[in-house]
DNA sequence: AGAATACCAACTAATTTAGTAGGATATATG
DNA sequence: CATATATCCTACTAAATTAGTTGGTATTCT
């Protein structure tokens, strides 16, 4: 179970923003250069992060992105959850009459998968950007 | 970050084996039917689980698979790690001279990613099959 | 002998991922 | 105002991965 590069890029960029928090807006071009990430790809990643209200943007020259709240208030779970869908969820089957894993799951392992999912979520929610600087 | 169906199938099958632990070898055909998983696919999954020494097999009629140790001694981390590669690792870049994420990583976020990775691993290692029955 | 089982390799279709290309819109600054 | 620097937006593409199938071989119980 690897994190996608999308998540990884997003995380790295967010850590970068956290490090420069007091400097105000940082343009993506700077982050792309710092982290050696394709600018175009990073733009799309930040569109998602913005939609999830994890960053705010300012357009125009000397614009850029800032964290929407302090590095102590943003956790890793939110970032990964935004970029890679529900963090640590299972993709079970939903076919042939029986519905798996969703609302109506009747199979015997659903509580188990839920337990695992929650353990990971809890671990990620416990790590704030501040802890990663 | 979703688990692949491979991991999910593997987990479900392992939980199934744990539930029937005292019954001895269980053929894959039974698990495939129980869990509504394609037999051919499950076979390949079990090839991996066996290689990782999480299950033992017996060939021939009335053969099948058994857990290689008690449900209290097998953790979720081992299963996911076997099936989906290093659990919770990051896929960073390794290009243009700089090596990322591997031995020689010099970027500033490596400790951060490591911390996240370890938090997830620890959470998964803490859950045993026994806890999921 | 025959049935049931693990074991093995190659192939395929569908999906996802990572990345590119080519713009449009907004704003600070000279 | 002109220009450079930004965000923002959509569509396309190549590569990789995933999920699953097919068609077998080898082993062992009954
Ligand atoms: S199969 Fe996923 S919870 Fe039942
Ligand atoms: S980029 Fe992954 S650890 Fe440096």
Image (cartoon, coloured by chain):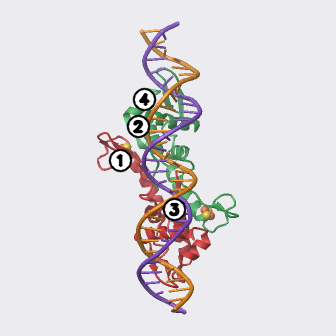
Chain colours: A green, B red, C orange, D purple
Labels 3 and 1: the sequence-earlier one: 3
Q: Which residue is mark 4?
A: A29
User: Which corner quadrant of the image does residue B56 belong to?
Assistant: bottom left
Mark 1 Cβ inside 8 Å of ligand 2: yes
Residues at marks 3 and 4, common chain?
no
Disc number placed over residue B6 in the picture, else none: 3
Query: Counting other residues with Cα less than 10 Å from the Cα at mark 2, is it few (<14), some (14-19), or many (20 or more)?
Result: some
Residue at mark 2: A37
Q: Are marks 3 and 2 on the same chain?
A: no
CA gap, disc 1 to disc 4?
Answer: 22 Å
Tell whether label 1 touches label 3 (CB within 8 Å): no
Give whichever of A88, B8 is nearer the camera.
B8
Cα distance in 3D space between marks 3 and 4: 38 Å
* Label 3, residues with CA under 10 Å away: few <14, some 14-19, many ≥20: some
Residue A60 on image: x %, y %: 51, 21
Check the residue under mark 4 and report the chain it is in.
Answer: A
Ligand 1's image quarter is bottom right
Label 4 vs label 2: CA separation?
A: 9 Å
Q: How many marks?
A: 4
């Amino acid at each position: 179970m690897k994190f996608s590069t999308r998540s990884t890029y997003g995380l790295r960029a967010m850590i970068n923003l956290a490090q420069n928090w007091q400097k105000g807006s940082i343009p993506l071009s700077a982050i792309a250069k710092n982290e050696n990430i394709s600018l175009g790809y990073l733009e799309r990643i930040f569109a998602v992060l913005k939609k999830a209200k994890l960053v705010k943007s300012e357009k125009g020259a000397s614009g850029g992105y800032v964290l929407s709240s302090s590095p102590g208030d943003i956790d890793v779970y939110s970032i990964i959850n935004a970029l890679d869908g529900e963090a640590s969820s299972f993709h079970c089957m939903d076919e042939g009459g029986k519905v798996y894993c969703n609302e109506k799951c009747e199979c015997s392992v659903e509580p188990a998968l839920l337990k695992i999912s929650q353990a990971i979520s809890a671990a990620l929610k416990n790590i704030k950007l501040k802890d990663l600087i």
